[in-house]
Amino acid sequence: MITLTAGMKAPAFKGKDQNDKTVSLADYKGKKVVLFFYPEDDTPTCTIEACNLRDNYSLLKKEGFEVLGVSPDDSSSHKKFETKFSLPYTLIADPEHKIIDAYGVWGEKQLYGRHYMGLHRTTFLIDEKGIIQKVYLKPRNKQHAEDIVKFWKEEM
């Protein structure tokens, strides 16, 4: 489960985006990054979160943030998700769980009394030096971007 906390160095990673291009955290050195992990493309809760980040993308960019989404889905699934909802940011495919495991967001979940393994929706705010400044466990989907900007302005 999640063991990364504010003040820790964000684990380096590489993965393929929705356009099959290799993306790494190092590509964003010197920039603030919103790294959000979500279980699955085009599911209700994940779509609400992704669309909130889309609808507030200009605000996030104005505040200097880059947005990266990561899920276990493959690049073609991400491309469909991006197209269907006009998502303006990078979605990284991680079907082998390399990034997911490095960030510790895979673990036991429970739904209606049933236990299973799955991805825990989590967002990491990473500063320009690659240090995690905030970890959102179960982010508030409908106002996630607003919470990010508010935190950064008030706490940083």
Image (cartoon, rainbow, N blue to C red):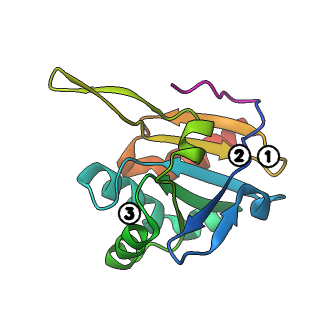
Q: In the image, 13: left or right of 54? A: right
Within-10-Å neighbours for mark 2: few <14, some 14–19, many 20+: many
3D distance between C-alphas at marks 1 and 2: 6 Å
Name the residue nearer the viewer: 120 or 131.
Answer: 120
> Which residue is labeled 1 in the image?
130
Q: Which mark is residue 126?
A: 2
3D distance between C-alphas at marks 2 and 3: 21 Å
Dot placed on the residue nearer the N-terminal end, 2 or 3: 3
- The amino acid type, in three-letter code, at marker 1 is Gly
Secondary element type, mark 2: strand
Residue at 47% x, 60% y is: 53
Instruction: Please identify the dominant SS of the magenta region.
Output: loop
Q: In the image, 78: left or right of 34? A: left
- Horizontal and vertical percent for residue 121? 43, 40
- Horizontal and vertical percent for residue 43? 26, 55
Q: Nearer the viewer, mark 3 or mark 1?
A: 1
> Which residue is labeled 3 in the image?
51
Dot placed on the residue nearer the N-terminal end, 3 or 1: 3
Residue at 37% x, 68% y is: 77
Asked if the residue under mark 2 is in contact with the one under mark 1, i.e. CB atoms within 8 Å, the reply is: yes
Compared with 128, 42 (above or below) is below
- The amino acid type, in three-letter code, at marker 3 is Cys
Name the residue nearer the viewer: 75 or 8.
Answer: 75
Q: Which mark is residue 84?
A: none
